Amino acid sequence: LFVKQQQKELLPIGCDNSQINIVIFNSSLDEMEVLEDWKNPIYIDQNEGIRRILEAFAEEPDYKFYLRVHPNLKGLNNTQMRETAEIANRYLNVEVIPPDDPVHTYALIDACDKVITFGSTVGVEACYWQKPSILLGRSFYEYLDCCYKPKNHVEVIQLLKENLVPKDRLEAVKYGYWAVRMGVPFTRFVQTEVWDPWGASVHRGKFMETEITYSRSAFRLNLFLMLFERESHPVLMKSIKRRLNFFRDKAKRLFGIS
């Protein structure tokens, strides 16, 4: 989905294979910030981790880092993006690739010696690409032996300096099979459109032969409901529940559910 806007085989200008090239793929922090179990086990957050890594190699001219900013961060002016801009201006050993840049993700993996992720699926894809993959966050594939998993910052730097071998790509195949086959197949619903809740498309399909659309608004309301119930904001909760009841009543009328 994300590579459709990228130019195949395109690399950053001046990419030099005589250096030790390391690519960092970040993730959009807003996707996981409210999940207690998804807190970064090594750093305060991703940007702190990136800064500390770059500082550790500031006097190592043989190392060059590329920070590929996640496409979900396109057009945002949040704390993460402002700090990313500060990183780009402050550190000379990194090239920041914006979220909408046409540089090809997989060409970048091929051109680099190691891959760093904070939980993005590109971490397990790098294993399949037979590149040493270093995981610095939580992920759905963290229990597979598809990447290196340092326990602290010292181990992170050690792994970046060591001559690592790629993990067995069979581990990536296991994850891919799970991603395709996970869950229980629908018996009454047939999906007719890819779901992209944050983008322009919506979830469309047929439920018992009736065309339905699951809008982004309904998706976000459900997400916000979960957040505000946890944080106990009674006024906002009342407003959100009223909107959710509207969607539920509409569904009841549509399907004749009493």
Image (cartoon, rainbow, N blue to C red):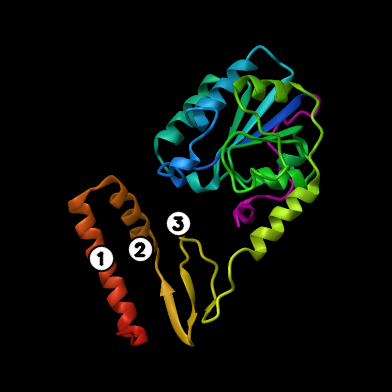
**Labels 1 and 3: the sequence-earlier one:** 3
**Labels 1 and 2: the sequence-earlier one:** 2
Residue 217: give its label. 2
Task: Judge by depth and name the residue closer to the eye, 58 or 153.
Answer: 153
Q: Which residues are magenta?
A: 1-18
Say what secondary structure mark 1 lies in. Answer: helix
* In magenta segment, residue 164: no
Read off the residue under disc 3. Answer: 198
Q: Residues within 10 Å of mark 1 (few under 14, many from 20)?
A: some
Residue 249, x across and y down, in percent: 28, 77
Q: Is residue 185 visible?
A: yes
Q: Quadrant of residue 155?
A: top right
Spatial CA span between label 2 and label 3 = 10 Å
Q: Which mark lies nearer to you, 1 or 3? A: 1
Task: Judge by depth and name the residue closer to the eye, 122 or 91.
Answer: 122
> Which amino acid does the dot numbered 1 rest on?
Arg
Residue 188, x across and y down, in percent: 51, 82
Q: Check whether the beta carbons of the residues at disc 1 and disc 2 lie within 8 A of each other.
A: yes
Say what secondary structure mark 3 lies in. Answer: loop
